Amino acid sequence: MAATRIKVCGITNLDDARQAVRLGVDSIGFIFANSPRQVTAEQVHQIINKLPPFINLTGVFVDEDIEEVQKTADYCGLDTLQLHGTETPEYCKQLKAWKVIKAFRVREKLEPKRMAAYEIAGYLLDTYQPKRLGGTGKTFNWDLAVEAEEVGPIILAGGLNPDNITTAVKKVEPYGVDINSGVESSPGQKDQQKLKRVVNNIRRLEYAE
Ligand SMILES: O=C(O)c1ccccc1NCC(=O)[C@H](O)[C@H](O)COP(=O)(O)O
């Protein structure tokens, strides 16, 4: 099995960022959109300044003014932009200076044609919930994620935690996983033990070969 890239999202403080880096997480995500995990550009700038090199930094936005996204990404030194709203393929094209991930919220079926219209670096599949745009803590039917593989690099999200991550990765074999509330003690605060378990469970799958 290929290595599974791990993104831990909803980081709000330096201790959690450092712990994720220490465990070898590939990307840490900061949510600039309205959320119990929302952070400001200033907070993220301060956190990132204190981190070592070789860690991918992702900013999560929802239908934000494009100039504001660019300004925040420049100021914080973000590598990747993750878009969770109704951003169009044209909107994404204007962010070519960064790697762009678009989130697609999955209900009963997948929309591969709609996804393929986006020329982006990664396609994040998250769980649809009527009132929440992310961080739902709920899984969706992973059979649908298996079908998405042909569109491009798939990042599996939605309700992943230390107890279901092995099954999810074995079944979907995604390019990467995005984990948020499943490794929290409360919204915005990561649980160090859960974080460690989730990373170890993924790495164990890779070493098993
Ligand atoms: O997490 C949030 O509060 C959030 C709010 C608005 C837009 C996006 C948000 N999260 C985006 C993520 O990258 C999450 O990691 C993803 O939705 C999975 O969350 P979870 O089901 O809690 O693992």
Image (spheres, helix red, strand yellow):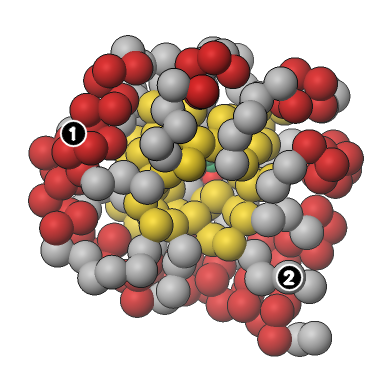
* Number of marks in the rendered image: 2
68 shown above or below 188: above
For mark 2, give the secondary structure. loop
Residue placed under numbered mark 1 in the picture: 40
The quarter of the rendered structure image containing the N terminus is: bottom right
Badge 1 crowding class, 10 Å Cα cut-off, few under 14, some 14 to 19, many 20 or more, is: some
Counting from the top left corner in percent of width and height, residue 199 is at 54, 71
Residue placed under numbered mark 2 in the picture: 2
Counting from the top left corner in percent of width and height, residue 146 is at 85, 46
Counting from the top left corner in percent of width and height, residue 172 is at 80, 54
**Pick the front one: 79 or 102:** 79
Amino acid carrying mark 1 in the image? Thr
Relative side of 184 to 44, left or right: right
Q: Going 72% across and 54% down the picture, which residue do you hit?
A: 174
Counting from the top left corner in percent of width and height, residue 6 is at 54, 61
Amino acid carrying mark 2 in the image? Ala
